[in-house]
Image (cartoon, rainbow, N blue to C red):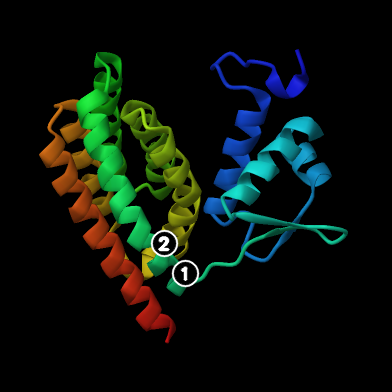
Amino acid sequence: MPRSRKIESNGETLSERAYRDIEELIVTLQLPPGSAVSEGLLSRRLAIGRTPIREALQRLARESLVQILPRRGIMVTEINARTQLRLLEARREVERLVARSAARRATPAERKRMTELAERFEASAKKNDDKAFMRVDREFNELSIAAAKNEFAAGAMRLMAGLSRRFWYHHYKEAADMPETAKLHADIARAIAKADEDAAARATDRLMDSVQSFTRDTVTADG
């Protein structure tokens, strides 16, 4: 089995772990916007071979978190608030579709997991723990995509998720309420767990209203 496809004890391949680890470094600004990265640097930092790192970077490039420049290297993309507003136009519709579909199609095991994630969202809110929130949010997005069982919506959501998390993390201390954001996510997770499509859609709209207001405040603050 190629090393990038080797399955680890938690069920991840090395490529999946490399993607998860690098995405977190980018989203939490440990790899800042505009910074240069390399396969070798990331391989040493994460103790993962270069092939899984390369595969992860190619996926991150498709999601616009890095840009691969021939003969110039790999750059972490910049953050742009006005671009984020355009992204939100699409994100609102996709997230509502995913939430409704997940509420309708989730398996019993997925509903149980949604309840657990709601509890973890609430725990991160109580502790005001931004890193814990970001990790639960990534799990929540992946579980929602799996439960929705719509590969086209999944592709669209994955293209937006990392950019959205990074933008939020970059600006939330200026204009957002992290505990409230975590609680809004918990509302969606609980509605999906209860198979309530309408409640899931309403909870998603409340979250998107909050995120859109936060993003507009950021644009105004930036002039």
* Among the 4 quarters of the image, the one containing residue 187: top left
Q: Residue at x 63, y 42 (%)?
A: 59
Q: Position of residue 218 (x, y in %)?
A: 38, 74
Q: Is residue 38 above or below residue 101?
A: below
Residue 128 image offset from top left, x and y in percent:
32, 49
Residue sitting at x 76%, y 20%: 3
Looking at the rendered structure, the kind of residue marked 1 is Thr
Question: Which dot marks residue 83?
Answer: 1
Residue 82 seen in the figure: yes
Q: Is the residue marked by circle 2 packed among few (<14), some (14-19), or many (20+) residues within 10 Å? A: some
As drawn, the label of residue 1 is none
> Picture quarter containing residue 11?
top right
- Residue at image x 40%, y 49%? 130
Rate crowding at label 1 as few (under 14), some (14 to 19) or many (20 or more) other CA atoms within 10 Å.
few
Q: Residue furthest front?
A: 152
Residue at the (35%, 69%) spot, across then down? 215
Label 1 sits on a secondary structure element that is helix
The local secondary structure at tag 2 comes to helix
Q: Quadrant of the N terminus?
A: top right
Residue located beneath label 2 in the image: 87
Q: Is residue 160 above or below residue 187?
A: below
Amino acid residing under circle 2: Leu
Marks 1,2: beta carbons within 8 A: yes
